[in-house]
Image (cartoon, coloured by chain):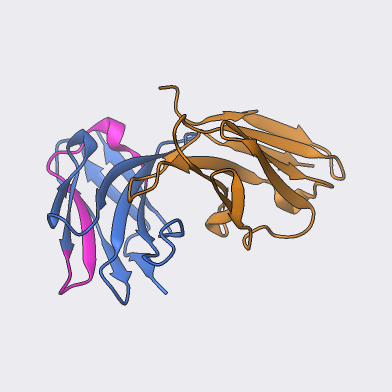
Amino acid sequence: DAGVIQSPRHEVTEMGQEVTLRCKPISGHNSLFWYRQTMMRGLELLIYFNNNVPIDDSGMPEDRFSAKMPNASFSTLKIQPSEPRDSAVYFCASTPGGGAGYTFGSGTRLTVV
Amino acid sequence: AQSVTQLDSHVSVSEGTPVLLRCNYSSSYSPSLFWYVQHPNKGLQLLLKYTSAATLVKGINGFEAEFKKSETSFHLTKPSAHMSDAAEYFCVVSDRDNDYKLSFGAGTTVTVRA
Protein backbone atom coordinates (compact mmCIF):
# COMPACT_ATOMS: atom_id res chain seq x y z
CA ASP A 1 0.00 0.00 0.00
CA ALA A 2 1.64 3.23 -1.17
CA GLY A 3 -0.52 5.39 1.05
CA VAL A 4 -2.02 8.70 -0.01
CA ILE A 5 0.09 10.16 -2.79
CA GLN A 6 0.32 13.89 -3.35
CA SER A 7 2.11 15.82 -6.05
CA PRO A 8 4.05 17.96 -6.34
CA ARG A 9 5.88 17.93 -2.99
CA HIS A 10 6.92 21.53 -3.42
CA GLU A 11 5.53 24.25 -5.62
CA VAL A 12 6.83 27.79 -6.02
CA THR A 13 4.78 30.07 -8.20
CA GLU A 14 4.29 33.74 -8.89
CA MET A 15 1.27 35.63 -7.71
CA GLY A 16 -1.55 35.44 -10.23
CA GLN A 17 -0.58 32.07 -11.62
CA GLU A 18 -2.79 29.01 -11.54
CA VAL A 19 -1.72 26.21 -9.21
CA THR A 20 -3.00 22.63 -9.32
CA LEU A 21 -2.36 20.19 -6.52
CA ARG A 22 -2.99 16.48 -7.02
CA CYS A 23 -3.96 13.61 -4.78
CA LYS A 24 -4.37 9.87 -5.15
CA PRO A 25 -6.20 8.36 -2.17
CA ILE A 26 -5.78 4.85 -0.88
CA SER A 27 -7.69 2.34 -2.95
CA GLY A 28 -10.98 1.47 -1.27
CA HIS A 29 -11.17 4.65 0.79
CA ASN A 30 -14.43 6.33 -0.10
CA SER A 31 -13.81 9.64 1.67
CA LEU A 32 -11.22 12.23 0.68
CA PHE A 33 -10.27 15.49 2.34
CA TRP A 34 -8.16 18.51 1.52
CA TYR A 35 -6.59 20.34 4.45
CA ARG A 36 -4.43 23.45 4.66
CA GLN A 37 -1.82 23.90 7.37
CA THR A 38 -0.31 27.24 8.36
CA MET A 39 1.49 28.42 11.45
CA MET A 40 -1.18 30.97 12.18
CA ARG A 41 -4.29 28.85 11.69
CA GLY A 42 -3.12 25.28 12.14
CA LEU A 43 -4.94 22.60 10.17
CA GLU A 44 -8.10 23.67 8.36
CA LEU A 45 -10.48 21.44 6.46
CA LEU A 46 -11.04 22.88 3.01
CA ILE A 47 -13.32 20.31 1.39
CA TYR A 48 -14.64 16.80 1.93
CA PHE A 49 -15.65 14.30 -0.76
CA ASN A 50 -17.61 11.12 -0.18
CA ASN A 51 -17.86 8.64 -3.05
CA ASN A 52 -16.41 11.32 -5.34
CA VAL A 53 -19.14 13.82 -4.46
CA PRO A 54 -18.30 17.08 -2.65
CA ILE A 55 -20.20 16.99 0.63
CA ASP A 56 -18.82 19.96 2.51
CA ASP A 57 -16.87 22.77 0.89
CA SER A 58 -17.56 25.35 3.57
CA GLY A 59 -13.86 25.56 4.36
CA MET A 60 -12.85 26.66 0.89
CA PRO A 61 -11.60 30.19 1.51
CA GLU A 62 -12.95 31.86 -1.59
CA ASP A 63 -13.90 31.41 -5.21
CA ARG A 64 -10.27 31.27 -6.24
CA PHE A 65 -10.18 27.78 -4.78
CA SER A 66 -11.84 24.83 -6.49
CA ALA A 67 -11.60 21.07 -6.05
CA LYS A 68 -12.65 18.14 -8.16
CA MET A 69 -12.76 14.39 -7.81
CA PRO A 70 -13.48 12.95 -11.25
CA ASN A 71 -13.06 9.35 -10.04
CA ALA A 72 -12.31 7.34 -6.91
CA SER A 73 -8.57 7.43 -7.44
CA PHE A 74 -7.84 11.08 -8.17
CA SER A 75 -8.57 14.55 -6.87
CA THR A 76 -7.28 18.02 -7.62
CA LEU A 77 -7.23 21.28 -5.72
CA LYS A 78 -6.84 24.33 -7.91
CA ILE A 79 -6.08 27.91 -6.97
CA GLN A 80 -6.61 30.52 -9.64
CA PRO A 81 -5.28 33.16 -9.37
CA SER A 82 -2.86 32.38 -6.57
CA GLU A 83 -1.90 34.96 -3.94
CA PRO A 84 0.98 35.11 -1.43
CA ARG A 85 -1.43 34.46 1.45
CA ASP A 86 -2.17 31.05 -0.09
CA SER A 87 1.32 29.93 0.87
CA ALA A 88 0.88 26.90 3.12
CA VAL A 89 1.20 23.14 3.22
CA TYR A 90 -1.77 21.45 1.63
CA PHE A 91 -2.61 17.93 2.77
CA CYS A 92 -4.84 15.35 1.23
CA ALA A 93 -6.26 12.60 3.43
CA SER A 94 -8.51 9.61 2.90
CA THR A 95 -10.42 7.18 5.07
CA PRO A 96 -12.64 4.16 4.55
CA GLY A 97 -15.02 5.62 7.16
CA GLY A 98 -16.66 3.75 10.01
CA GLY A 99 -14.57 5.41 12.68
CA ALA A 100 -11.26 4.46 11.11
CA GLY A 101 -8.54 7.04 11.29
CA TYR A 102 -7.46 9.15 8.39
CA THR A 103 -4.37 8.54 6.29
CA PHE A 104 -2.64 11.73 5.29
CA GLY A 105 -0.38 12.31 2.34
CA SER A 106 3.01 13.94 2.74
CA GLY A 107 1.63 17.28 1.66
CA THR A 108 2.42 19.90 -0.95
CA ARG A 109 4.33 22.91 0.27
CA LEU A 110 3.08 25.85 -1.76
CA THR A 111 4.94 29.13 -1.88
CA VAL A 112 3.42 32.02 -3.80
CA VAL A 113 5.81 34.91 -4.38
CA ALA B 1 -19.49 21.82 19.09
CA GLN B 2 -16.54 19.77 20.18
CA SER B 3 -12.99 20.96 20.60
CA VAL B 4 -9.67 19.92 22.08
CA THR B 5 -7.11 21.85 24.06
CA GLN B 6 -3.51 20.74 24.18
CA LEU B 7 -2.15 22.09 27.40
CA ASP B 8 1.50 22.29 26.40
CA SER B 9 2.80 23.84 23.21
CA HIS B 10 6.27 22.39 23.78
CA VAL B 11 7.58 19.46 25.80
CA SER B 12 11.24 18.62 26.23
CA VAL B 13 12.37 15.28 27.64
CA SER B 14 15.56 13.32 27.97
CA GLU B 15 15.97 10.13 25.98
CA GLY B 16 14.80 7.17 28.03
CA THR B 17 12.47 9.18 30.28
CA PRO B 18 8.65 9.18 30.17
CA VAL B 19 6.68 11.44 27.86
CA LEU B 20 3.33 12.97 28.80
CA LEU B 21 1.32 15.07 26.36
CA ARG B 22 -1.86 16.51 27.79
CA CYS B 23 -5.15 16.95 25.98
CA ASN B 24 -8.55 18.00 27.26
CA TYR B 25 -11.65 17.78 25.15
CA SER B 26 -14.97 19.50 25.15
CA SER B 27 -17.95 17.59 23.83
CA SER B 28 -21.60 17.21 24.63
CA TYR B 29 -21.42 13.47 24.03
CA SER B 30 -18.89 10.68 24.12
CA PRO B 31 -16.47 11.66 21.42
CA SER B 32 -14.10 9.84 19.11
CA LEU B 33 -10.57 10.96 19.91
CA PHE B 34 -7.31 10.52 18.08
CA TRP B 35 -3.64 11.31 18.44
CA TYR B 36 -1.61 12.05 15.33
CA VAL B 37 2.12 12.63 14.98
CA GLN B 38 3.78 14.81 12.37
CA HIS B 39 7.49 14.53 11.77
CA PRO B 40 9.24 17.44 10.05
CA ASN B 41 8.19 17.85 6.42
CA LYS B 42 5.93 14.83 6.65
CA GLY B 43 2.21 14.19 6.71
CA LEU B 44 0.26 13.30 9.82
CA GLN B 45 0.37 9.70 11.00
CA LEU B 46 -2.28 8.12 13.20
CA LEU B 47 -0.84 7.01 16.54
CA LEU B 48 -4.02 5.73 18.17
CA LYS B 49 -7.76 6.27 18.43
CA TYR B 50 -10.50 6.01 21.03
CA THR B 51 -14.01 5.14 19.87
CA SER B 52 -15.88 4.22 23.07
CA ALA B 53 -14.35 0.80 23.56
CA ALA B 54 -11.55 0.28 26.10
CA THR B 55 -10.58 3.48 27.88
CA LEU B 56 -6.88 2.65 27.71
CA VAL B 57 -5.82 2.71 24.10
CA LYS B 58 -2.52 1.36 22.87
CA GLY B 59 -1.01 2.77 19.74
CA ILE B 60 2.05 2.42 17.61
CA ASN B 61 5.64 3.00 18.70
CA GLY B 62 4.89 2.32 22.37
CA PHE B 63 2.43 5.18 22.84
CA GLU B 64 -0.81 4.84 24.74
CA ALA B 65 -3.59 7.15 25.85
CA GLU B 66 -6.27 6.94 28.50
CA PHE B 67 -9.75 8.32 28.05
CA LYS B 68 -11.04 9.80 31.32
CA LYS B 69 -14.58 11.02 31.01
CA SER B 70 -14.67 12.49 34.51
CA GLU B 71 -11.68 14.67 33.67
CA THR B 72 -12.54 15.16 29.98
CA SER B 73 -8.97 14.21 29.21
CA PHE B 74 -7.15 12.05 26.70
CA HIS B 75 -3.49 12.31 27.63
CA LEU B 76 -0.82 10.60 25.56
CA THR B 77 2.06 8.80 27.26
CA LYS B 78 5.13 6.76 26.47
CA PRO B 79 7.27 5.14 29.17
CA SER B 80 10.62 5.79 27.52
CA ALA B 81 11.29 8.47 24.91
CA HIS B 82 13.41 7.77 21.88
CA MET B 83 15.18 10.31 19.72
CA SER B 84 12.85 9.40 16.86
CA ASP B 85 9.88 10.60 18.93
CA ALA B 86 10.89 14.21 18.30
CA ALA B 87 7.93 15.55 16.32
CA GLU B 88 4.70 17.50 16.64
CA TYR B 89 1.71 15.74 18.15
CA PHE B 90 -1.92 16.61 17.57
CA CYS B 91 -4.90 15.66 19.68
CA VAL B 92 -8.03 15.42 17.52
CA VAL B 93 -11.74 15.00 18.14
CA SER B 94 -14.36 14.10 15.57
CA ASP B 95 -17.88 15.42 15.34
CA ARG B 96 -20.21 12.54 16.19
CA ASP B 97 -23.01 13.86 13.95
CA ASN B 98 -20.63 14.58 11.11
CA ASP B 99 -17.80 12.24 11.84
CA TYR B 100 -15.75 13.48 8.93
CA LYS B 101 -15.22 16.79 10.70
CA LEU B 102 -12.06 16.69 12.75
CA SER B 103 -11.11 19.40 15.23
CA PHE B 104 -7.37 19.57 15.71
CA GLY B 105 -5.58 20.82 18.77
CA ALA B 106 -2.87 23.42 18.33
CA GLY B 107 -0.19 20.78 18.58
CA THR B 108 2.59 19.94 21.03
CA THR B 109 6.16 19.97 19.82
CA VAL B 110 8.30 17.31 21.47
CA THR B 111 12.06 17.58 21.62
CA VAL B 112 14.18 14.74 22.93
CA ARG B 113 17.55 15.45 24.51
CA ALA B 114 20.34 12.92 24.20
Residue at 48% x, 41% y: name it.
Answer: A30
Q: Quadrant of residue B50?
A: bottom left
Residue at 35% x, 66% y: name it.
Answer: B5
Height in image: A61 above or below A19? below
Stretch of the chain drawn in magenta: B68-89
From the viewer's side, name the closer residue of B80 and A80: A80
- Name, please, the residue furthest toward the top: A1
Residue B31 magenta-drawn?
A: no
B97 relative to B13 in the view: left or right: right
Q: Colour of chain B?
A: blue
Residue at 38% x, 60% y: name it.
Answer: B94
Residue B95 rendering spot, x and y as whole percentages = 40, 64
Image quarter in which the C terminus of chain B is found = top left
Numbered marks: total? 0
- Name, please, the residue furthest toward the right: A16
From the viewer's side, name the closer residue of A28 and A1: A28
Q: Quadrant of residue A24?
A: top right
- The chain whose colour is orange is A
Image quarter in which the N terminus of chain B is found = bottom left
Height in image: A13 above or below B58? above
B94 relative to A72 in the view: left or right: left
